[in-house]
Image (cartoon, rainbow, N blue to C red):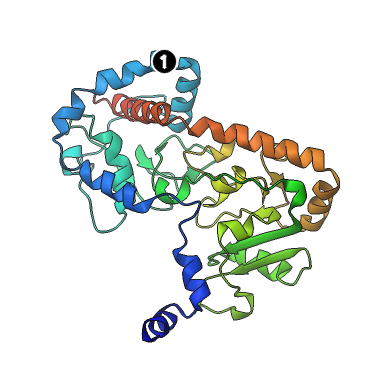
Amino acid sequence: MVFLNYNNFITGGSVNQIAKKLSVRHKNNKFLYYAISFARQIFPRIIFKSRLKLKLSAIKDFDADYIRKRVDYYNKLEKNVDLSDAVSTLRYFKMKKKNKTYFFDSYEYTRYFDSFLKMDYKFGDVTFVPDEPAIVKSRPINGDNSNSVLLNLDKIRHFTFINDRKDFRKKKDMLVSRNYVRQPHRLKFLEMYIDHPMCNIGKINKNDGHEDLLREIMTFDEQLEYKFILCLEGHDVASNLKWVMSSQSLAVMPVPKYETWFMEGKLIPNHHYMLIKEDYSDLEERMVYYMTHTDEALEIIRNAHQYIENFKNKRREDLISLLVLEKYFSRTNQI
Protein backbone atom coordinates (compact mmCIF):
# COMPACT_ATOMS: atom_id res chain seq x y z
CA MET A 1 0.00 0.00 0.00
CA VAL A 2 2.87 2.34 0.71
CA PHE A 3 4.20 1.71 -2.81
CA LEU A 4 0.89 2.73 -4.39
CA ASN A 5 0.60 5.83 -2.26
CA TYR A 6 4.14 6.82 -3.23
CA ASN A 7 3.24 6.54 -6.91
CA ASN A 8 0.10 8.56 -6.36
CA PHE A 9 2.20 11.22 -4.74
CA ILE A 10 4.65 11.30 -7.65
CA THR A 11 2.08 11.31 -10.43
CA GLY A 12 -0.79 13.05 -8.73
CA GLY A 13 -3.14 10.39 -10.11
CA SER A 14 -5.01 7.22 -9.24
CA VAL A 15 -3.73 3.67 -9.61
CA ASN A 16 -5.89 3.39 -12.73
CA GLN A 17 -4.25 6.47 -14.22
CA ILE A 18 -0.80 5.07 -13.46
CA ALA A 19 -1.72 1.87 -15.27
CA LYS A 20 -2.84 3.89 -18.30
CA LYS A 21 0.41 5.83 -18.35
CA LEU A 22 2.37 2.58 -18.29
CA SER A 23 0.22 0.89 -20.94
CA VAL A 24 2.26 -0.20 -23.98
CA ARG A 25 -0.58 -1.61 -26.07
CA HIS A 26 -0.45 -0.19 -29.65
CA LYS A 27 2.89 1.46 -28.87
CA ASN A 28 6.36 0.71 -30.24
CA ASN A 29 8.56 -1.61 -28.18
CA LYS A 30 10.96 0.78 -26.45
CA PHE A 31 13.06 -1.95 -24.86
CA LEU A 32 13.72 -3.57 -28.23
CA TYR A 33 14.35 -0.19 -29.85
CA TYR A 34 17.00 0.81 -27.30
CA ALA A 35 18.59 -2.64 -27.30
CA ILE A 36 19.06 -2.56 -31.07
CA SER A 37 20.18 1.08 -31.05
CA PHE A 38 22.87 0.51 -28.42
CA ALA A 39 23.99 -2.68 -30.17
CA ARG A 40 24.70 -0.70 -33.35
CA GLN A 41 27.38 1.23 -31.48
CA ILE A 42 29.41 -1.93 -30.92
CA PHE A 43 30.36 -2.68 -34.51
CA PRO A 44 33.03 -0.68 -36.41
CA ARG A 45 31.77 1.73 -39.05
CA ILE A 46 33.97 0.13 -41.69
CA ILE A 47 31.69 -2.90 -41.72
CA PHE A 48 28.71 -0.80 -42.72
CA LYS A 49 30.66 1.46 -45.07
CA SER A 50 31.62 -1.59 -47.14
CA ARG A 51 27.94 -2.49 -47.50
CA LEU A 52 26.68 0.88 -48.71
CA LYS A 53 26.83 0.08 -52.43
CA LEU A 54 24.98 -3.16 -51.85
CA LYS A 55 22.33 -1.36 -49.86
CA LEU A 56 21.84 1.28 -52.56
CA SER A 57 21.67 -1.35 -55.29
CA ALA A 58 18.38 -2.51 -53.78
CA ILE A 59 16.69 0.26 -55.75
CA LYS A 60 16.34 -2.25 -58.61
CA ASP A 61 13.88 -4.20 -56.45
CA PHE A 62 11.49 -1.26 -56.14
CA ASP A 63 9.78 1.42 -58.20
CA ALA A 64 12.79 3.66 -58.79
CA ASP A 65 10.66 6.62 -59.88
CA TYR A 66 8.63 6.49 -56.67
CA ILE A 67 11.79 6.28 -54.57
CA ARG A 68 13.41 9.24 -56.33
CA LYS A 69 10.29 11.33 -55.79
CA ARG A 70 10.37 10.54 -52.08
CA VAL A 71 14.10 11.31 -51.87
CA ASP A 72 13.65 14.64 -53.67
CA TYR A 73 10.73 15.52 -51.41
CA TYR A 74 12.77 15.00 -48.25
CA ASN A 75 15.92 16.52 -49.70
CA LYS A 76 15.03 19.52 -51.87
CA LEU A 77 18.59 20.72 -52.40
CA GLU A 78 18.92 21.54 -56.10
CA LYS A 79 22.22 23.45 -56.15
CA ASN A 80 25.52 22.48 -54.65
CA VAL A 81 26.61 24.43 -51.60
CA ASP A 82 29.60 24.20 -49.25
CA LEU A 83 28.98 23.71 -45.56
CA SER A 84 30.60 26.21 -43.22
CA ASP A 85 33.70 25.44 -41.17
CA ALA A 86 31.54 25.35 -38.07
CA VAL A 87 29.93 22.07 -39.18
CA SER A 88 31.70 19.02 -37.73
CA THR A 89 32.27 15.63 -39.35
CA LEU A 90 30.52 12.35 -38.63
CA ARG A 91 33.58 11.33 -36.65
CA TYR A 92 32.38 13.67 -33.90
CA PHE A 93 28.72 12.71 -34.23
CA LYS A 94 28.26 11.10 -30.82
CA MET A 95 25.38 10.21 -28.55
CA LYS A 96 24.56 12.85 -25.97
CA LYS A 97 22.38 12.77 -22.89
CA LYS A 98 19.72 14.83 -24.63
CA ASN A 99 17.90 13.71 -27.78
CA LYS A 100 19.15 10.11 -27.68
CA THR A 101 16.45 8.88 -30.05
CA TYR A 102 17.39 11.51 -32.62
CA PHE A 103 20.98 10.31 -32.51
CA PHE A 104 19.98 6.65 -32.73
CA ASP A 105 17.70 7.24 -35.71
CA SER A 106 20.36 9.27 -37.52
CA TYR A 107 23.21 6.87 -36.73
CA GLU A 108 21.20 3.98 -38.15
CA TYR A 109 22.03 5.47 -41.58
CA THR A 110 25.06 7.75 -41.10
CA ARG A 111 27.16 4.72 -40.07
CA TYR A 112 27.23 3.68 -43.73
CA PHE A 113 29.13 6.83 -44.75
CA ASP A 114 32.74 7.96 -44.31
CA SER A 115 33.44 9.55 -40.97
CA PHE A 116 35.22 12.53 -42.60
CA LEU A 117 31.94 13.75 -44.14
CA LYS A 118 30.40 16.82 -42.55
CA MET A 119 26.76 16.90 -41.49
CA ASP A 120 24.84 19.69 -39.85
CA TYR A 121 21.77 18.70 -37.85
CA LYS A 122 19.08 20.32 -35.73
CA PHE A 123 17.41 17.96 -33.29
CA GLY A 124 14.07 18.50 -31.59
CA ASP A 125 10.81 20.07 -32.75
CA VAL A 126 12.26 22.26 -35.49
CA THR A 127 9.85 24.87 -36.86
CA PHE A 128 12.38 27.05 -38.67
CA VAL A 129 14.56 26.57 -41.74
CA PRO A 130 18.32 26.42 -40.93
CA ASP A 131 20.75 28.87 -42.50
CA GLU A 132 22.60 26.02 -44.20
CA PRO A 133 21.57 22.46 -45.15
CA ALA A 134 20.85 20.40 -42.04
CA ILE A 135 19.22 17.12 -41.09
CA VAL A 136 15.96 17.72 -39.19
CA LYS A 137 12.92 15.82 -38.00
CA SER A 138 10.44 18.56 -38.90
CA ARG A 139 10.16 21.65 -41.07
CA PRO A 140 7.63 24.28 -42.16
CA ILE A 141 5.59 23.12 -45.15
CA ASN A 142 5.27 26.50 -46.86
CA GLY A 143 8.05 28.66 -48.26
CA ASP A 144 11.58 27.70 -49.22
CA ASN A 145 12.43 24.82 -46.91
CA SER A 146 15.22 23.29 -49.00
CA ASN A 147 17.81 23.67 -46.22
CA SER A 148 15.65 21.41 -44.04
CA VAL A 149 16.54 17.85 -45.04
CA LEU A 150 14.16 15.35 -43.46
CA LEU A 151 15.04 12.03 -41.87
CA ASN A 152 12.72 9.83 -39.87
CA LEU A 153 13.81 10.93 -36.40
CA ASP A 154 12.28 10.17 -33.00
CA LYS A 155 10.27 7.46 -34.76
CA ILE A 156 9.82 5.42 -31.58
CA ARG A 157 7.37 8.14 -30.52
CA HIS A 158 5.97 9.38 -33.81
CA PHE A 159 5.77 6.38 -36.12
CA THR A 160 3.15 4.21 -34.46
CA PHE A 161 0.60 2.28 -36.50
CA ILE A 162 -2.22 0.25 -34.99
CA ASN A 163 -4.69 -2.47 -35.88
CA ASP A 164 -8.15 -1.11 -35.10
CA ARG A 165 -10.85 -3.72 -35.67
CA LYS A 166 -13.89 -1.69 -34.62
CA ASP A 167 -16.06 -0.48 -37.49
CA PHE A 168 -16.40 3.30 -37.80
CA ARG A 169 -20.20 2.95 -37.87
CA LYS A 170 -20.23 1.29 -34.44
CA LYS A 171 -18.21 3.99 -32.72
CA LYS A 172 -19.46 6.89 -30.61
CA ASP A 173 -20.69 9.98 -32.49
CA MET A 174 -18.18 12.15 -30.65
CA LEU A 175 -14.75 13.72 -30.88
CA VAL A 176 -12.05 12.62 -28.44
CA SER A 177 -8.74 14.21 -27.49
CA ARG A 178 -6.17 13.85 -24.72
CA ASN A 179 -3.04 15.95 -25.16
CA TYR A 180 -0.38 17.92 -23.41
CA VAL A 181 -1.63 21.46 -23.90
CA ARG A 182 1.06 24.12 -23.77
CA GLN A 183 0.41 26.01 -27.01
CA PRO A 184 -2.17 28.81 -27.38
CA HIS A 185 -3.93 27.13 -30.32
CA ARG A 186 -4.45 23.89 -28.39
CA LEU A 187 -5.68 25.85 -25.40
CA LYS A 188 -8.09 27.77 -27.63
CA PHE A 189 -9.63 24.55 -28.92
CA LEU A 190 -10.16 23.19 -25.41
CA GLU A 191 -11.73 26.41 -24.19
CA MET A 192 -14.12 26.40 -27.16
CA TYR A 193 -15.28 22.78 -26.86
CA ILE A 194 -14.50 21.47 -23.35
CA ASP A 195 -18.20 21.41 -22.42
CA HIS A 196 -19.58 20.55 -25.85
CA PRO A 197 -21.89 17.47 -25.73
CA MET A 198 -20.23 16.02 -28.85
CA CYS A 199 -16.71 16.24 -27.40
CA ASN A 200 -14.74 14.27 -24.83
CA ILE A 201 -11.57 16.35 -24.70
CA GLY A 202 -9.09 17.57 -22.13
CA LYS A 203 -5.49 18.23 -21.28
CA ILE A 204 -3.37 15.79 -19.28
CA ASN A 205 -0.50 18.03 -18.14
CA LYS A 206 -0.81 19.37 -14.61
CA ASN A 207 0.60 22.19 -12.49
CA ASP A 208 0.52 24.81 -15.23
CA GLY A 209 -2.88 26.39 -14.75
CA HIS A 210 -6.23 25.84 -16.49
CA GLU A 211 -7.11 23.05 -14.07
CA ASP A 212 -10.71 23.21 -15.31
CA LEU A 213 -9.51 21.73 -18.61
CA LEU A 214 -7.76 18.78 -16.95
CA ARG A 215 -9.15 15.31 -17.70
CA GLU A 216 -8.07 11.75 -16.98
CA ILE A 217 -5.65 10.05 -19.33
CA MET A 218 -7.19 7.76 -21.95
CA THR A 219 -5.51 4.76 -23.56
CA PHE A 220 -5.43 4.30 -27.32
CA ASP A 221 -8.16 1.66 -27.02
CA GLU A 222 -10.41 4.06 -25.12
CA GLN A 223 -9.93 6.74 -27.76
CA LEU A 224 -10.65 4.25 -30.54
CA GLU A 225 -14.23 4.00 -29.27
CA TYR A 226 -14.88 7.39 -30.92
CA LYS A 227 -15.55 8.22 -34.56
CA PHE A 228 -13.49 11.41 -34.51
CA ILE A 229 -10.01 11.89 -33.01
CA LEU A 230 -8.45 15.34 -32.83
CA CYS A 231 -4.96 15.69 -34.34
CA LEU A 232 -3.88 19.23 -33.54
CA GLU A 233 -0.26 20.20 -34.11
CA GLY A 234 1.80 20.87 -30.99
CA HIS A 235 5.24 22.47 -31.19
CA ASP A 236 5.46 21.04 -34.69
CA VAL A 237 3.38 18.13 -36.04
CA ALA A 238 0.57 16.21 -34.34
CA SER A 239 2.35 13.18 -32.88
CA ASN A 240 -0.84 11.08 -32.86
CA LEU A 241 -1.63 11.57 -36.57
CA LYS A 242 0.03 8.36 -37.77
CA TRP A 243 -1.79 5.99 -35.44
CA VAL A 244 -5.09 7.81 -35.91
CA MET A 245 -4.83 7.55 -39.71
CA SER A 246 -4.13 3.83 -39.36
CA SER A 247 -7.31 3.38 -37.28
CA GLN A 248 -10.99 3.11 -38.20
CA SER A 249 -11.63 6.63 -36.89
CA LEU A 250 -11.36 9.95 -38.69
CA ALA A 251 -8.37 12.20 -38.04
CA VAL A 252 -9.66 15.74 -37.46
CA MET A 253 -7.44 18.78 -38.01
CA PRO A 254 -6.88 22.03 -39.90
CA VAL A 255 -4.42 22.12 -42.80
CA PRO A 256 -1.01 21.29 -41.24
CA LYS A 257 1.79 23.86 -41.08
CA TYR A 258 4.68 21.48 -40.43
CA GLU A 259 5.80 18.14 -41.80
CA THR A 260 8.09 15.21 -41.05
CA TRP A 261 9.05 11.96 -42.78
CA PHE A 262 5.28 11.31 -42.92
CA MET A 263 5.03 14.05 -45.58
CA GLU A 264 2.14 15.85 -43.93
CA GLY A 265 2.35 18.41 -46.72
CA LYS A 266 1.13 15.71 -49.13
CA LEU A 267 -2.06 14.99 -47.18
CA ILE A 268 -5.27 16.01 -48.96
CA PRO A 269 -8.08 17.58 -46.87
CA ASN A 270 -11.29 15.52 -46.76
CA HIS A 271 -9.45 12.77 -48.61
CA HIS A 272 -6.96 11.62 -45.96
CA TYR A 273 -8.43 13.44 -42.96
CA MET A 274 -11.45 15.51 -41.93
CA LEU A 275 -10.68 19.18 -42.42
CA ILE A 276 -11.78 21.85 -39.97
CA LYS A 277 -11.20 25.58 -40.22
CA GLU A 278 -8.14 27.22 -38.71
CA ASP A 279 -10.38 28.88 -36.09
CA TYR A 280 -12.14 25.54 -35.35
CA SER A 281 -15.57 27.18 -35.78
CA ASP A 282 -17.01 24.51 -38.09
CA LEU A 283 -16.19 21.46 -35.97
CA GLU A 284 -19.78 20.47 -35.14
CA GLU A 285 -20.94 21.06 -38.73
CA ARG A 286 -18.17 18.83 -40.15
CA MET A 287 -18.82 16.08 -37.59
CA VAL A 288 -22.53 16.02 -38.35
CA TYR A 289 -21.77 15.87 -42.08
CA TYR A 290 -19.65 12.73 -41.80
CA MET A 291 -22.03 11.17 -39.28
CA THR A 292 -24.75 11.43 -41.93
CA HIS A 293 -22.48 10.73 -44.94
CA THR A 294 -20.94 7.53 -43.66
CA ASP A 295 -19.81 6.33 -47.08
CA GLU A 296 -17.65 9.43 -47.46
CA ALA A 297 -16.19 8.93 -44.00
CA LEU A 298 -15.31 5.33 -44.81
CA GLU A 299 -13.69 6.45 -48.05
CA ILE A 300 -11.45 8.87 -46.13
CA ILE A 301 -10.46 6.06 -43.78
CA ARG A 302 -9.60 3.81 -46.74
CA ASN A 303 -7.54 6.59 -48.30
CA ALA A 304 -5.73 7.15 -45.00
CA HIS A 305 -4.90 3.45 -44.74
CA GLN A 306 -3.59 3.44 -48.29
CA TYR A 307 -1.36 6.42 -47.44
CA ILE A 308 -0.06 4.64 -44.34
CA GLU A 309 1.03 1.66 -46.46
CA ASN A 310 3.69 3.87 -48.06
CA PHE A 311 5.73 3.69 -44.85
CA LYS A 312 5.46 0.04 -43.87
CA ASN A 313 8.18 -1.49 -46.06
CA LYS A 314 11.24 -1.24 -43.78
CA ARG A 315 13.69 -2.21 -46.52
CA ARG A 316 12.38 0.49 -48.83
CA GLU A 317 12.32 3.10 -46.06
CA ASP A 318 15.95 2.27 -45.25
CA LEU A 319 16.90 2.70 -48.90
CA ILE A 320 15.17 6.08 -49.14
CA SER A 321 16.90 7.24 -45.95
CA LEU A 322 20.33 6.29 -47.29
CA LEU A 323 19.62 8.03 -50.60
CA VAL A 324 18.51 11.18 -48.78
CA LEU A 325 21.86 11.24 -46.97
CA GLU A 326 23.80 10.43 -50.13
CA LYS A 327 22.14 13.37 -51.86
CA TYR A 328 22.92 15.57 -48.85
CA PHE A 329 26.63 14.75 -48.99
CA SER A 330 26.64 15.14 -52.77
CA ARG A 331 24.88 18.52 -52.77
CA THR A 332 27.29 19.77 -50.13
CA ASN A 333 30.24 18.95 -52.42
CA GLN A 334 31.57 16.07 -50.34
CA ILE A 335 31.03 13.04 -52.58
| Residue 301, picture quadrant | top right
| Quadrant position of the N terminus in the picture | bottom left
Relative height, residue 150 to residue 234 (above, below): above
Residue 238's spot in the image, x, y percent?
55, 52
Depth check: give the residue in front, 242 or 139.
242
* Residue at the disc numbered 1: 61
Q: Residue at x 66, y 38 (%)?
A: 272
Question: Is 300 left or right of 286, judged from the image as shown?
Answer: left
Residue 46's spot in the image, x, y percent?
14, 29
Depth check: give the residue in front, 186 or 35.
35
Q: How many marks?
A: 1
Q: Is residue 84 visible?
A: yes
Depth check: give the residue in front, 262 or 167.
167
Q: Is residue 268 visible?
A: no
Relative height, residue 330 to residue 247 (above, below): above
Question: Is 8 left or right of 86, judged from the image as shown?
Answer: right
Q: Residue at x 23, y 41 (%)?
A: 87
Element class at badge 1: helix
